[in-house]
Image: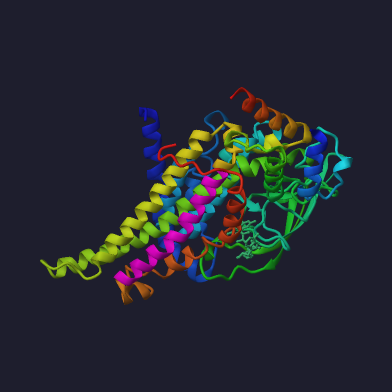
Amino acid sequence: MKDKIRDILSRLGKLPVAVDSLADDSDLYTAGLSSFASVQLMLGLEDGFDIEFPDNLLNRRSFASIDAIAATVEQIIATRKVA
Amino acid sequence: MNVMAEVRAESLVSRAQRVAAVAAQHAEAVDREGRFPREAVDAMIAERLLGIQVPAVHGGEGATFSEIAELCSILSQACASSSMIFAMHHIKLSSLVEHGLESAWLTAFMQRVASEQLLLGSATTEGGIGGNLRNSICAIEIENGVCRLEKDATVISYGDYADAILITSRAHKDAAPSDQVMTVFLKDQYTLERTHVWDTLGMRGTCSDGFLFKGEAPAEQVFPKPFAEIAAQSMLAASHLLWSGVWYGIAADAVIKSQNFIRAAARKSPGQTPPGAIHLANIANQLQMVKSNIVAGLKTYEDAKRDEEKLSSMAFAVAMNNIKICSSEMILPIINGAMLICGIMGYKNGTPFSLGRNLRDAHSAQLMISNDRILGNTSSMLLVHRQDTSLLG
Ligand SMILES: Cc1cc2nc3c(=O)[nH]c(=O)nc-3n(C[C@H](O)[C@H](O)[C@H](O)COP(=O)(O)OP(=O)(O)OC[C@H]3O[C@@H](n4cnc5c(N)ncnc54)[C@H](O)[C@@H]3O)c2cc1C
């Protein structure tokens, strides 16, 4: 999953640094993720994982690092399985 | 409201009314000469209004945004420039109150603001960046416990008169443009070299000249929290709500002037409804919309307060952006309607119905962080954030 996230991030995150140079827990905002790019990233994740982010997860923290994104995506997929 | 809160709210309002009386006396000269409203700001200091937002345990009165917005409205009915200065000071103070407690220096400074009634200025706007306050070109350098910053700050309101300036920059020389910090510099820790003179259509008393800012201070004066979080969790809300309080007051004053005009006409010819009365009904309705919108925004903020999740959510950001767009746009047709009612008496300067200053001051609202920029930002959030369609939620 994290590889796929990295792929989407490198296409849509418009980061000034290479995604490969970031650790899974690196802060993406410090790395230069802008608010506009973060929306593009969310759209890319929705499309890539066939999910929709509920409003309560649409905040900075959910997208603050590759780890955080993975946890957010997993949480959505898990709730979907239960439902 | 409990009894204590009632007494306090009562006294805040009457203190602000005394300041408004002083501001009103000098408003025309301040506007004409484009000078700092010294008398009004001295009156704010005498009434100790610059520290009211600071929690009582730190020497203030713990005033809420709602209370402060009401004071902005009272002041701007007398002098919008004075009111905007009061609003901008409290927007800066909100960053200290909401995010300063994790730092001993910032906490002590907040206490000084209350005890010494210090006036805080703001420098977010930068040459080459404009109103995109979540980006900086300049970077702060921190070395051996000292921080240094140079910024081409193209607009700093009352820069010459502030006791301290809260200024944004990139966090270090290699930081991305959006990786920002905010730092407090005290008056004796910076120099300001004037680069632009504020000779404007309206809001002339804010004296928002441009400056080359050069500062050096102990590094502990940098906010530990990233500016991105300060902006999202309190500063944008504080700006949109308190500015809206100022703008509402400008429009409310115009409505009152036109109502006075209509009532005078009605008294002169009893039994006949004056021709402009229908316009008055219309702008009173529009003013109520602006008011409801701001009141709802204040409630949204007070409800979300101290809940970092909620404050960082898109729903909250969209709601606050909408408050700003609504109040900055709606006040113009309201004042224009008042002008149609008062006619030449409104168009002329120096009558009890003059609306020139209201109209000129109000035109700054759409530019103060350009509405195009804000709508662009909201439209991007609406690509993922779903609009809440409930009426009360
Ligand atoms: C009374 C007053 C007091 C102020 N006091 C201060 C102060 O104390 N400190 C401070 O730092 N600043 C202050 N400002 C500045 C204010 O916060 C804004 O930064 C400033 O008004 C924006 O200036 P601008 O229109 O030149 O820049 P920009 O934001 O660059 O906008 C210029 C134009 O470009 C267009 N535009 C640019 N980017 C976009 C985009 N992404 N999307 C859509 N349209 C875009 C817009 O149409 C806009 O009209 C003050 C402003 C006023 C009116």
Which of the four quarters of the rendered structure image does ligand 1 lie in?
A: bottom right
Q: Residue at x 64, y 69 (%)?
A: B197
Say if B270 sits above or below B327 in the image. Answer: below
Residues rendered magenta in the picture:
B316-341
Kindly indicate the quadrant of the structure image that contains residue B13.
Answer: top left
Furthest residue toward top: A82
State left or right for residue A9 relative to residue B335.
Answer: right
**Quarter of the figure with residue B58:** top right
Q: Where is residue B250 in the image (x, y as percent from the top left)?
A: 42, 59
- Left or right relative to B9: residue B284: left
Q: Is residue B186 left or right of residue B41?
A: right
Of B138 and A38, which appears nearest the observer?
A: A38
Q: Quadrant of the N terminus of chain B?
A: top left
- Please tell me whether the stretch drawn in magenta is mainly helix, strand or loop: helix
Residue B270 location in percent, x, y?
A: 11, 67
Residue A41 pos. (x, y %): 72, 45
Residue at screen point 61% across, 45% down: B384
Image quarter where the C terminus of chain B lies is top left
**Residue B170's spot in the image, x, y percent?**
77, 49
Colouring scheme, one of rainbow, by chain, secondary structure, one colour: rainbow
Q: Is residue B61 visible?
A: no
Could you say which is closer to the camera, residue B69 or residue B368?
B368
Instruction: Examine the rendered structure and indicate whether residue B262 appears above or below residue A64.
Output: below
Say if the magenta span includes residue B331: yes
Residue depicted at x 32% and y 68%: B353
Total residue callouts:
0
B114 vs B151, nearest the viewer: B151
Q: Would you place residue B135 above or below residue B304 in this image?
A: below
Please check the rendered image and state whether residue B261 is part of the magenta-colored stretch, yes or no.
Answer: no
Give the left or right position of residue B125, taking residue B364 as reference.
right
Tell me if I can see residue A57 in this picture. yes
